[in-house]
Image (spheres, helix red, strand yellow):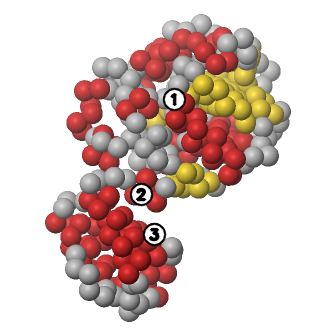
Amino acid sequence: MSEKSWALLELLRWTTAYLTEKAVPEPRLTAELLLAGALRLKRLDLYLQFDRPLRPEELADFKARLRRRVKREPLQYIEGEAAFRELRLQVDPRVLIPRPETELLVGEVLRWADGRPGLDVLDVGTGSGAIALSLAVEGRFSRVVASDLSADALAMATMNYARIAPETPVEFREGNVYDPVRGESFDVVVSNPPYVALEESMALGPEVREWEPHAALFAGSTGLDVLRELIRGAPGMLKPGGLFALEIGASQAPAVVEMIRGTAGFRPPRVSRDLAGRDRMVLTEFAGSRHRPLHHGSTD
């Protein structure tokens, strides 16, 4: 890219062609988002300023962003934030980028908890804090405990908490799975754990495989290692009638359902699908509650 003066529309066209040549997905949209970020504009506002020339400092910022994207760094890391439900979370390579599938998991928990104020929640593997902070902001929970094995992830989650929801009752704990909360019990245990099989790594796009934290992605040869540990220990963490809610890989529902059915104390689980129609969540209750059961659609 030369140092000449660039008008916005001209730069968009050049960048779209360049990204196409480099096989970057969605080249036109990517060009628009990179330019909007460099100019501190909303993407749609670009269309009101097509003839505007870029100042040298704006062009330099844009070129830096473009170089990062061509290396297949995710746009969310380049921008430093990701949208999740009602929140805008700070993200970088210390944490996974929150996905729309996980937004649905939060929605399932909020629906179950509606009309039941004062519940305690445990979010295992909080990462950026997406689940814990969304539940704290949108729900009516007495306490949300968010744990993660990664101190780096907890630093990011704590930063998001301080910026987004410092008045909410969220606690952060460092440790593996249930280790940080031994001896406590909760009305809800929710987790979006690592669930990708190691053998599937090459099927992932370079944005995921080369940039996102592997410890938050991969869970053994089948992808079930952490899910198995979560299921095995959940009865010791849940109050009677409590909700256990997991995000899973698209092909893992049969194995996860079988593990839950083989664990004493759980009611029949329900499998819920994502917006693409793939099995994505498994939810069940720990027996012994006067609470109303899961809504219809349970997998028997």
Amino acid type, mark 3: Gly
Which residue: 34% across, 65% down? 64
Residue 255 drawn above or below residue 2: above
Residue 118 drawn above or below residue 29: above
Residue 63 visible in the current orientation = yes
From the image, tell me which residue sits under label 2.
Answer: 78
Q: What is the number of the mark on residue 51?
A: none
From the image, tell me which residue sits under label 3.
Answer: 37
Farthest residue in the bottom direction?
Answer: 51
Mark 3: secondary structure: helix
Whether tag 2 and tag 3 are in contact, CB under 8 A, the answer is yes
Whether tag 1 and tag 3 are in contact, CB under 8 A, the answer is no
Mark 2: secondary structure: helix
Mark 1, other Cα within 10 Å: few <14 / some 14–19 / many ≥20: some
Q: Quadrant of residue 155?
A: top right
Amino acid type, mark 1: Ser
100 sits left or right of 87 in the view: left
Between marks 2 and 1, how big is the CA–CA gap?
A: 22 Å
Amino acid type, mark 2: Ile
Q: Residue 8: percent from the left, percent from the top? A: 36, 84
Q: Earlier in the sequence, mark 2 or mark 3?
A: 3
From the image, tell me which residue sits under label 1.
Answer: 150
Between marks 2 and 3, how big is the CA–CA gap?
A: 9 Å
Q: Residue 281: percent from the left, percent from the top? A: 51, 33
Residue 113 visible in the current orientation = no
Q: Earlier in the sequence, mark 1 or mark 3?
A: 3
Which residue: 64% across, 40% down? 158
Which residue: 44% across, 55% down? 76
Which residue: 41% across, 77% down? 57
Q: Earlier in the sequence, mark 2 or mark 1?
A: 2
